[in-house]
Image: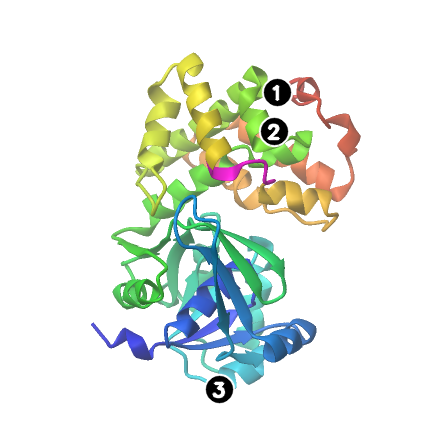
Amino acid sequence: MRDTSAMKFLFIGAGAIGTYVGGSLADAGHDVSFVEQPAAAEIIRAEGLTIVRHLAKGDDRPERTHVQDVTLFTSPSDALAAGPYDVAVCALKSFDTGSAIEAMIATGHEVPPVLSLQNGVDNEPLIGSLLGSGNVIAGTVTTAVGKPGIGQVIEEKRRGLGVSLEHHLGADLVGALSSAGLNARGYAHAGPMKWSKLLTNLQGNATSAILDLTVREVFADKRTFALEIAALRECLEVMKALGFSAVDLPGTPVKALAFGVRRVPTPLLQPILVKMLGEGRGDKMPSFHIDLHSGRGQTEVQFLNGAVVRHGADVGVPTPVNTLLTDTLQALTSGTESKETFRKNPEALLARLP
């Protein structure tokens, strides 16, 4: 294994995950650069990155890490010209993946292998189709991170990162990320890791956005709980047809979730999941809700619930619940459906089930 202390990273964007992972790597002594929009780059250049962590469960005293030793670029061409890099890291929303990688290719400079720390199961195939399958590394993040401002992140719940060992740099990346205190774990195969994370991402995400309810409220209602369990079971059936079993992710017992969804009677499972989600998330809204109700006009639902639908069609597994959630949230995002139709109204959504 190479000396991981010398790894050189280029982060495509300084969003919540990019700032958290990139700032942690820079603080641990790795060479870290970001390519960002000019306004955000100027703020980070002047003020650096700030990462706030809580040292232990129940400890309200925050550990604040300030990182100044990062390099900022405002164009992919300038960033890549300063290479070569060991790895580029992509933690963008899935709907930005293709344009970001195409912009890097268009510079004519060497594009390093890309580590995708994104949600969903289709980013790595897309990146591989553009750069070649040998130039993409599958990854996942289970640590919960909030972003109160540009260059500022809060580690809300430390869990860890997963990295596929199918790429020859996988073990090096596990070492580098672990050296930065990020609790990285290697996985022999990307498929089970990525689909296991997808299973956790589905929990309440789309339903919360559509109904304007917290995830805890979604799981506490018997009607919407049944809808959620049906969506998760569809995902598990698609995974099974693809030959994938759930695997535990850092700090995330996905195998227990899969077993519960498949085998535990609903009356027993509901209070368990309500308690788990309440402790893990509280009343923090999930990403789909934030995107829809902030008026961004874009949603990742087609890359999460929609991925279950697409892959289900490929392997002959019906996915009516994930289809409903995907189509409804896309309609709300585009404005072809009114958000008032479903707000706090589970029956309106359930009535759309075939």
User: Quick one: 204 or 68, which is closer to the camera?
Assistant: 68
Crowd class of label 3 (few under 14; some 14 to 19; many from 20; radius 10 Å):
few
Quadrant showing the N terminus: bottom left
- Disc 2 marks which amino acid? Leu
Q: Is residue 79 magenta?
A: no
Local secondary structure at mark 1: loop
Local secondary structure at mark 2: helix
- Give the mark nearer the N terminus: 3 vs 1: 3
Residue, disc 1 = 353
Quadrant showing the C terminus: top right
* Disc assigned to residue 82: 3
In x, y percent, where is residue 115?
41, 64
* Disc assigned to residue 324: 2
Q: Find the residue positioned furthest to the bottom.
A: 82
- The structure residue drawn at horizontal position 59% and vertical position 57%, both measured from the top left corner, is 147
- Disc 1 marks which amino acid? Leu
Specify the segment rendered in magenta. 280-285
In x, y percent, where is residue 217?
59, 26
- Disc 3 marks which amino acid? Ala
User: Quick one: 187 or 124, which is closer to the camera?
Assistant: 187
- Number of marks in picture: 3
Q: Nearer the viewer, mark 2 or mark 3?
A: 3
Crowd class of label 2 (few under 14; some 14 to 19; many from 20; radius 10 Å):
many
- The structure residue drawn at horizontal position 54% and vertical position 36%, both measured from the top left corner, is 282
